[in-house]
Amino acid sequence: MKRKLHELAHARAGDKGDTLTLALFAYRDEDYVLLRNQVTAEAVKRHLGHIVQGAVRRFEVPNLHALQFVCERALDTGVTTSLGLDPHGKTLSYALLEMQIET
């Protein structure tokens, strides 16, 4: 069965220039393993590939049952220099939560 990430986790985002950070926090401790196994850097790159032009790196934060993703070349040169309507990282955290995984 497939479920969207927003059913299992919440996300926070940050942006600095053209680099986006996305943190994904499991609602329930037992779902962290599921997220860790399926929400890989490659899966996030595939899901956000139409926006994230650079590399995606993942860091595990097991004490918080969280995953952090650093996405390069993701904000159309950055919030203050982009001609895009809303290149803020927080909008992309919602896009990540639409990703589906097997449960």
Image (cartoon, rainbow, N blue to C red):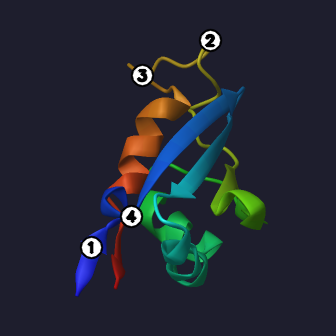
User: Circle 1 sits on which residue?
Assistant: 3
Q: Nearer the viewer, residue 87 or 91?
A: 91
* SS state under label 1: strand
Looking at the rendered structure, which numbered label has been put on residue 80?
2
Residue denoted by label 3: 86
Q: Measuring 42% from the left and 33% from the top, which residue is drawn there?
A: 91
Q: Residues within 10 Å of mark 3 (few under 14, many from 20)?
A: some
Point out the frontmost of discs 4 and 1: 4
Secondary structure under tag 2 reads loop
Residue 3 vertical placement versus 89 (above, below): below
Query: Residue at point 64% right, 28% down?
Result: 77
Sequence-earlier tag: 4 or 1: 1
CB atoms at circles 3 and 4 under 8 Å apart? no
Question: Is label 4 in contact with label 1 (beta carbons under 8 Å)?
Answer: yes
Task: Report x, y in % for residue 90.
Answer: 49, 32
Amino acid marked by disc 1: Arg
Badge 3 amino acid: Asp
* Farthest top residue in view: 80
Tell me the distance, in whole angstroms, between the alpha carbons under discs 2 and 4.
33 Å
Q: Earlier in the sequence, mark 2 or mark 1?
A: 1
